[in-house]
Amino acid sequence: MKDLHSCYLAVGTDMIIEDENIWMPLYGRNGLCKIDRKKKQCESIVCFKDEKLSQEYLYDSVIKVGEKIILIPGSAFKIAIYDIRDGNIQYIEILEVCGEQYDLKFWGGFTYKNDVYLLGCQYPAILKIELENLDVSYINDWIPTIKNYNKNTFDSLKFLHDKQSHRCFHLS
């Protein structure tokens, strides 16, 4: 750990503030930062495998559930779940939808009961993660309904992904 006054932190847009620690994704770098508030020390505690070492908005948001930190992908290719107790990381692959790549997949999320929901930014679905078994549901059946309400918003959305058949439907 480094003394907080000698640390230069380029932090992301979100953080978890607790009595003893602050957790935040690093901005422009591959890592999760932990700040010990009492000792006034900081450290980069993890580097995420298979991701670039320097990338803007790699993990844009964080959610803490129990002793786990869920890192929500901005430009990252996987959801990362960091276990505070043992330092292990689990990864959840995100389905590629119709061969598209997104610069900023999700903008945030929330918890409800024992599930985590990730809200898409450019990714055309809401992801529901069941934390007990890490099953992921892709919720996108609402898109055709609201498409008619705001045409300008959906002009940039090129397609829908049918989660049952894994087929693409263009919205033209």
Image (cartoon, helix red, strand yellow):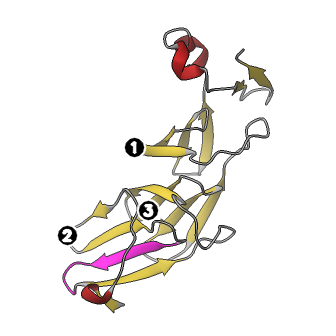
Q: What stretch is highlighted in magenta?
A: 31-39
Of the image marks 3 and 2, the number of the one nearer the N terminus = 2
Q: Is residue 94 visible?
A: yes
Residue 34 is one of the magenta-drawn residues:
yes
Q: Upstream in the sequence, badge 1 or badge 3?
A: 3
Residue 5 is drawn in which quadrant?
bottom left
Dot 3 amino acid type: Ile
- Between 43 and 139, the one nearer to me in the picture: 43
Which of the 4 image quarters holds residue 140?
top right
- Magenta-drawn stretch contains 4: no
- What's the distance in space between the residues labelled 1 and 3, CA to CA? 12 Å
Q: Residues within 10 Å of mark 2 (few under 14, many from 20)?
A: few
On the image, the x and y values in percent for residue 32 come to 46, 71
Q: Is residue 157 above or below residue 19?
A: above
Q: What is the secondary structure assignment of the residue under circle 2?
A: loop
Report the disc number at residue 69: 3
Q: Are marks 1 and 3 in contact (CB under 8 Å)?
A: no
